[in-house]
Amino acid sequence: MLFASSHPLCWTATLLGDLSCYQFPPLRSLFYHARILFLFTKSDMKTILLPVTVFSLALVSAPFHLPTLLMTVLWIWVHLLHFCIANQYYSTNEDALNKPWRPLPSGLLTTADAFTIRWSLVPICLFMSILHRTLVPSLVLLAATWLYNDCFWNKHGVVKNFLNVVGYLAFECGAAVCLSRNMGLTPSSTNALITSGLIILTTVHAGDFPDIGGDLKEGRNTLPILFPTLTRHILCATITLWTGYACIMTTTWSLAPVLGLAVLGTAVAEAFRNKDSDRRQDRFAFILYNVWLSAIHVALAATANTARWQSLPTSI
């Protein structure tokens, strides 16, 4: 049995009240199983689901359509779930140290359950991608997931970062195609996607700083482990440079968002600058980084898709 509903955890009661939870066992079971799947992707909501959705929404020129947006979010989440299960299948020891609430280290699921769910998601991903004409991004994501996790390419810092870029771009391309509703992407949108890849390539190791302890335990040679001081300096420099680039690209905006972007970029760079930061400080810095990354992507998309953003004010 994949999901042992006899587990004492019953979070449905929090949403529906204790009485209703026990009056409707099927609903309780549904929420229970949904929460387990959510826990696989919880940490990546702020790093993948939210930034990719916001960037794709701002990038495409197709009129807003709520059902399409919901299906796009579902497409992103199902592919993200597949990656997260594949990744956490091999990192139970690390998660027991860094994220003990995840389904595998907490005992909500066994590794056999995770294996079955992970491979059951593959045909679902492909079927959804055929419907939305996003088969190529889906195949790229599935291949990158296999290389990253099953081939253990994530243990090598440079290769890991490259695969992160490939995966991130596949998410963005797939989401943009879903939202465009067969209208296609403009050359300026394609340039924005390429720039997004460069930003991620030069800053993605920001996510390795909070996980140094777990990476050491798993024997991974991430860049912050190999070059702890140098990578902080490089990260601060690249964040500052990309922030400056985005501010220049958005000079036609009102002053307030440009200043906000500049202040946010400076705050993120300063948060990572301290070489004596502990895990808690690095975790906070990584949250700031994700806010900055979302803001940078909105700026990229807005400059690429001026038709949608013509209503932006030109003065404070």
Image (spheres, rainbow, N blue to C red):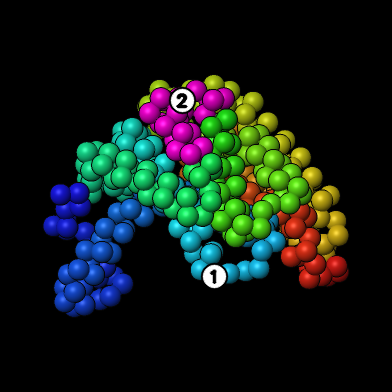
Residue placed most toward the observer, 77 or 294:
77
Residue designated by label 1: 66
Residue beneath the point at 59% across and 53% down: 177
Q: Main secondary structure of the magenta part?
A: helix
Rounded to the nearest angstrom, the CA distance separating label 1 from label 2 is 38 Å
x%, y% of residue 255?
Answer: 83, 62
* Amino acid at dot 1: Leu
Side of 222 where 305 appears, left or right? right
* Amino acid at dot 2: Trp
Residue beneath the point at 16% across and 73% down: 22
- Whether 158 is among the magenta residues is yes
Residue designated by label 2: 153
Q: Which quadrant of the figure has residue 232? A: top right
Any part of residue 307 in sight: yes
Residues shaded magenta? 139-160
Judged from the image, the secondary structure of the residue bearing numbered disc 2 is helix
Side of 97 where 178 appears, left or right? right
Any part of residue 97 in sight: no
x%, y% of residue 39?
Answer: 35, 52
Closer to the chain start, of discs 1 and 2, is 1
Q: Nearer the viewer, mark 1 or mark 2?
A: 1
